[in-house]
């Protein structure tokens, strides 16, 4: 499988784009005409620059409004085509993409179009060039790949072929099985893009909202399986028009792009649907829970954090044999507090301040998980081991944090006994009934949300849920969840669009994305609330107005509502069950804890978000200039 990407997909000038594309490991690049026109160097120099980066030009595009024109426009389009052929030869590419005509002057007619392509094929053949025809979803007469294929078939010229673009086919819900009967040598290249399902004008949707395969909602895998069935084994080329990507980091977007193709290729390989030459990698890692979450803390702050964890019912159960690292436990939850000034934790503290910078996942096979992550372009994380320590495979995760993999088949299963000495915790504070981690909430800039969604779903056996808008009094935060079928993995990703929201404040003030809250599970939230209160832990106060509305909305028994209100417990319900939530205040720049009880409920309490965010915000340090 060879991978390519259109220059239009990422930001920067042509030079920056090519650098990022080469660095991400692509084999080829589609030169989008405007990127070339806006650049100062000659076609020959551009071609050289591409080859100097070790890349091949997969095609030059687009050539517009060609087929089915009346004279004198028809002659002019052929003259235009000859000019572009000159340019292609100088640049060093043999393929041009012709997209279906959108001009109101176009006459239509399958045979007229086929005749035009035959003539273009003759002209291209004289120069050793090839022409690929693509149906735009909004083409004036041709907007279906089946019609484009019929034109190519009737043109019957070896230098004329078809270009299939998943967006144009899938946005119109055209049956992908129609692809299976196209001879593979007539498919000159495959362009791939996904998109979120939004009901809007096709052209606008395509030009602004496309995203990488796996990031959106279109059945790109079905499309690819149909392509693979033809025996096609050529380039897979991304063509992503996306406003966010245009403003994003060229390197990050290029890395996402290549990851999306490798992940898609791996799914095609597993579906055994064709003969694509594909690298093999271990299957997505099955996650059986969150083994630990690790905080980096300054020595001076440790007593505040350990007192807080104590009041939340955690016991200090272990101290690392060689490092300043402690573990606190309750139920299945392990919270690691790292005050080691050396190593990554110390560096992370220096940069972000106190933060939950790492987490460990229980997977079926940690070595396989790391091998897959690395095969998908994740950055392996390693630091020197002290004597007696065992190596825990890890990669760089969200916002420069660390994601560790542990399994129960190696010594990693006994990490707490091997690396830690037991501690006798004689605190008089009692456990409060927390059983495990329900979810981990990570906050990032909105532009980074798709990156992390793809990262997690490509590496882990998990799916994404639809995006929901979380309304913060100061703006919108977009939230999407990565979760697995067992519910043992739940990560909520919150993309902040501005720095005034609680989420935006957190990433601005801690200098990067990261874990903003941890939600612990309990089987009895009322008992937990009472135990917290006995431990002197003050939960977040929720407005009484919320409870009046809640009672009316769900028709709750007033006595029940009073109990919720007495403990500041939020409530929600869906078709599957009930959900109870309570919160800590925020700490530092906006970190907090949540405690939930779910009985079948599938969501995360989005309906309550505005109320608890309003309450959480009251604890934030005000920012801005002091009043004069
Ligand atoms: O939006 C467009 O005009 C356009 C151009 C070329 C393509 O390959 C495409 O898919 C869309
Ligand atoms: Mg296209």
Image (cartoon, helix red, strand yellow):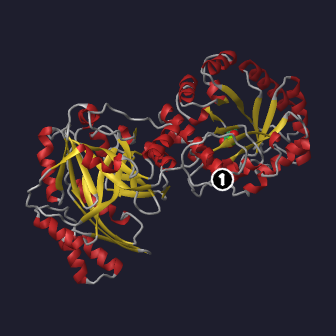
Left or right: 606 in relation to 387: right
Q: Is mark 1 within 8 Å of ligand 2?
A: no
Residue 408 appears in the picture as rendered: yes
For the question of whether residue 495 can be seen, the reply is: no
Q: At x 80% / y 51%, what residue is drawn?
A: 146
361 and 256: which is toward the camera: 361
x and y percent of residue 536 in the render? 10, 62
Q: Secondary structure at mark 1?
A: helix
Residue shown at 69% from the left, 58% from the top: 173
**For this rendering, which residue is in front, 273 or 551?**
273
State the image quarter where residue 157 is shown: top right
How far across and how far down the image is residue 174, in percent? 73, 57
For label 1, the crowd category at 10 Å Cα-Cα, with few meaning under 14, some 14 to 19 and many 20 or more, is few
Query: Where's residue 513, x and y in %?
Result: 35, 42
Looking at the rendered image, the quarter that the C terminus falls into is top left
Task: Give left or right: position of 345 versus 150.
Answer: left
Ligand 2 lies in quarter: top right
- The residue drawn where x is 48% and y is 45% is 368
- Front in this rendered view, residue 448 or 115: 448
For the image, the number of numbered tags is: 1
Against 44, is 69 above or below?
Answer: below
Q: Quadrant of the N terminus?
A: top right
Residue corresponding to mark 1: 271
> Is 451 left or right of 274, judged from the image as shown?
left
Residue for point 33% across, 39% down: 512
Horizontal and vertical percent position of residue 349: 24, 36
């Amino acid at each position: 499988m060879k991978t390519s990407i259109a220059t239009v997909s990422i930001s920067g000038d042509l030079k920056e784009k090519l650098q990022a594309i080469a660095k991400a490991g692509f084999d080829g690049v589609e030169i989008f005409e405007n990127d070339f026109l806006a650049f100062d160097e000659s076609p020959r120099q551009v071609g050289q620059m591409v080859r100097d980066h070790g890349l091949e030009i997969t095609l030059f595009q687009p050539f517009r409004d060609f087929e089915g024109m009346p004279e004198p426009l028809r002659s002019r389009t052929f003259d235009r085509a000859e000019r572009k052929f000159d340019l292609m030869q100088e640049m060093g590419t043999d393929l041009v993409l012709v997209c279906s005509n959108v001009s109101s002057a176009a006459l239509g007619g399958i045979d007229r179009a086929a005749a035009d392509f035959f003539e273009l094929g003759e002209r291209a053949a004289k120069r050793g060039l090839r022409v690929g025809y693509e149906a735009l979803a909004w083409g004036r007469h041709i907007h279906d790949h089946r019609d484009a294929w019929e034109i190519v078939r009737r043109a019957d010229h070896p230098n004329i072929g078809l270009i299939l673009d998943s967006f144009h086919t899938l946005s119109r819900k055209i049956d992908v099985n129609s692809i299976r009967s196209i001879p593979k040598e007539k498919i000159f290249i495959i362009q791939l893009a996904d998109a979120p399902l939004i009901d809007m004008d096709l052209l606008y949707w395509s030009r602004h909202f496309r995203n990488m395969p796996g990031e959106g909602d279109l059945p790109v895998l079905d499309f690819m399986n149909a392509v693979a069935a033809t025996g096609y084994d050529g380039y897979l080329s991304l063509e992503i028009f996306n406003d966010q990507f245009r403003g994003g980091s060229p390197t990050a977007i290029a890395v996402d792009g290549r990851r999306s193709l490798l992940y898609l290729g791996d799914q095609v390989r597993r579906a055994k649907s064709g003969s694509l030459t594909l690298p093999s990698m271990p299957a997505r890692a099955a996650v059986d829970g969150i083994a630990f979450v690790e905080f980096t803390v300054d020595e001076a702050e440790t007593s505040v954090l350990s007192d807080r964890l104590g009041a939340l019912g955690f016991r200090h159960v272990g101290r690392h044999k060689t490092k300043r690292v402690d573990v606190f436990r309750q139920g299945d939850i392990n919270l690691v507090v790292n005050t080691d000034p050396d190593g990554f934790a110390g560096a992370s503290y220096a940069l972000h301040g106190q933060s939950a910078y790492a987490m460990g996942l229980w997977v079926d096979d940690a070595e396989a998980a790391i091998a897959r992550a690395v095969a998908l372009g994740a950055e392996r994380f390693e630091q020197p081991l002290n004597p007696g320590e065992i190596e825990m495979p890890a990669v760089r995760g969200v916002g420069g944090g660390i994601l560790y993999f542990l399994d129960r088949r190696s010594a990693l299963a006994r990490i707490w006994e091997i690396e830690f000495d037991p501690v006798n915790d004689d605190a008089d504070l009692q456990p409060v009934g927390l059983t495990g981690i329900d979810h981990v909430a990570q906050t990032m800039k909105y532009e980074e949300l798709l990156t992390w969604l793809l990262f997690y779903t490509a590496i882990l056996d998990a799916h994404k849920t639809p995006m929901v808008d979380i309304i913060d009094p100061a703006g919108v935060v977009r939230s999407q969840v990565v979760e697995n079928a067992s519910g043992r993995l739940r990560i909520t990703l919150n993309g902040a669009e501005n720095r005034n929201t609680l989420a935006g404040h957190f990433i601005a003030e801690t200098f990067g994305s990261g874990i903003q809250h941890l939600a612990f599970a309990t089987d009895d939230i009322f008992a937990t609330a009472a135990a917290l209160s006995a431990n002197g832990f003050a939960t977040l106060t929720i407005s009484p107005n919320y409870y009046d509305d809640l009672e009316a909305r769900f028709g709750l028994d007033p006595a029940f509502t009073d109990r919720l209100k007495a403990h500041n417990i939020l409530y929600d319900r869906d078709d599957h069950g009930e959900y109870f939530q309570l919160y800590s205040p925020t700490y530092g720049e906006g970190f907090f804890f949540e405690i939930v009880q779910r009985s079948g409920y599938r969501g995360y309490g989005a309906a309550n978000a505005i109320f608890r965010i309003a309450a959480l915000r009251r604890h934030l340090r005000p920012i801005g200039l002091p009043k004069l």
